[in-house]
Image (tube, rainbow, N blue to C red):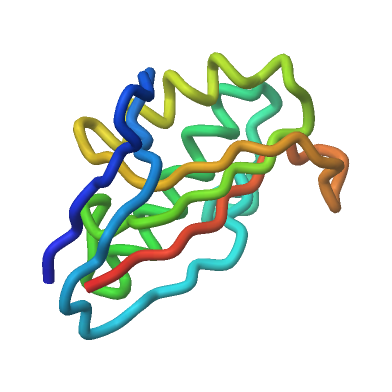
Amino acid sequence: MEIVPVDLPGMTHTGNFTDSLLVKSAESLLFVSGQIPETPDGDIPEDFAGQCRVAWQNLVSVLEANKLGIENLVKVTVYLSSRRYREINKRIRSEFLGDHRCAIVVLVADMWDEPLLLTIDAIAAA
């Protein structure tokens, strides 16, 4: 399988996203439900940075449980409870993604449970 980032000519990007990804010869797709910032012990950090790291770690754990890694992500959607978290979200997302580029959407939306400040869903290919 090959994942090829394809950007529109003349578009500038900051961060680790791409305009599109072409997935060639994938054998399987993984659709990851929204990962919330709850630890395996049931704890939810009070601050956004802590919640963001836990949600990303939960996503990584789901990938690993399916014998995949960050490099398999092709689409990530992050739902933030407030626009004020966008820069912290971008920084922590970059910590987890490193140099990997995928299609990314960040939305502001009400959360199902009030203590939650974000949730992350994703699609991975292998």
Residue 27, position in %: x, y? 21, 85
Q: Is residue 82 left or right of residue 42?
A: right
Residue 107, position in %: x, y? 69, 38
Residue at image x 48%, y 50%? 76
Residue at image x 52%, y 56%? 40
Viewer-proximal residue among 14 and 45: 14
Position above or below: 5 against 12: below
Residue placed furthest toward the bottom: 27
Instruction: Point out the image quarter for the C terminus.
Output: bottom left
Residue 11, position in %: x, y? 37, 24
Position above or below: 90 against 21: above
Position above or below: 28 against 40: below
Residue 105, position in %: x, y? 56, 42
Viewer-proximal residue among 98 and 65: 98
Q: Is residue 116 left or right of residue 74?
A: right
For residue 66, which quarter of the picture?
bottom left
Position above or below: 60 against 23: above
Residue at image x 53%, y 44%? 55
Viewer-proximal residue among 44 and 21: 21
Q: Is residue 94 left or right of residue 35?
A: left
Residue placed furthest toward the front: 9
